[in-house]
Image (tube, grey):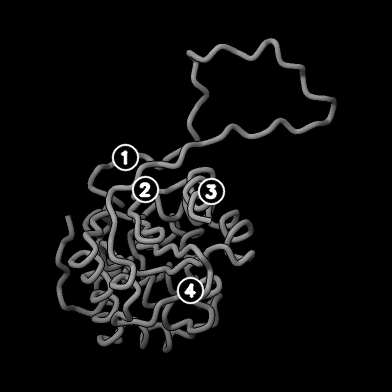
Amino acid sequence: MIRSLPRRTVLSLLAVSAAALVAACSDSGEAPKAEAPADPAKPPAAAEAPPSAGATPPAAAVAAPESQGSVDMAKLLEPGALPDKVLGNDDAPVTIVEYASMTCPHCAQFHATTLPELKTKYIDTGKARLIFREFPFDPRAEAGFMLARCSNDNYFPMVDVLFKQQQNWASVENAKDALLQISKLAGFSQESFEACLTDQKLLDDVRAVQKRGSDEFKVDSTPTFFINGNTYKGALTIAEMSAIIDGML
């Protein structure tokens, strides 16, 4: 469920107790997805010849997960309150739109474990592009996205750092000081940090991106992916992503 947030500057809320602010990634409360274990009911292939010394056994095939619906791609790709942040070529045959929250551990897991391989295998090779959109569940997530937007050309590096350092700022008692220290390493001064987090227009725009995702595309948890219009929820593994994308190429 999406909670409405008060029209106060994010900066004034960062010192509030973390327990009152940090929301779960999804309503389901499910743990991040992991690779499917081997089927214990399947007999071992005893008759098969063992692999030669030093050979790498082939990875088990993973079935593409079923989508939870679909959306109109033309509508999904219409401009919103903020310019889309994109990795990859505009003419890639597969478009992935991700809605994420900066305080969501499922999102941090996806960006740490799946995105690097997704980028190498599909984005850098021109097969797919990723459009990343803000879907904050709490003021701390809003602050993280605002700082990333204020980083201009360093948007994705800032997002990456904030996800990697998530435990050091998202759940601490005073997130303002923690975010300030991270931001200084990214080139912010205290003045530019405070100016960013008191920018009401930017805050309104970040919230507008979230509201559009909720109202128009029924996003209610993070991460949510739209892959060529098909909806998938949860931190997909690279094997699951590959199975989906390969079926579209």
Q: Is residue 69 left or right of residue 156?
A: left
Query: CA gap, disc 1 to disc 3?
Result: 22 Å
Q: Earlier in the sequence, mark 4 or mark 2?
A: 4
Judge the density around disc 4: few (<14), some (14-19), many (≥20) Cα neighbours within 10 Å.
some
Judge the density around disc 2: few (<14), some (14-19), many (≥20) Cα neighbours within 10 Å.
some
Judge the density around disc 3: few (<14), some (14-19), many (≥20) Cα neighbours within 10 Å.
some
Q: Secondary structure at mark 1?
A: loop
The residue at 49%/83% (across/down) is 188
Q: Give yes or no for contact between labels 2 and 1 (Cβ–Cβ under 8 Å).
A: yes
Q: Secondary structure at mark 2?
A: loop
Residue position for label 4: 86
Type of the residue with mark 2? Gly
Type of the residue with mark 4? Val
Q: Secondary structure at mark 4?
A: strand
Q: Nearer the viewer, residue 233 or 138?
A: 233
Q: Quadrant of the N terminus?
A: bottom left
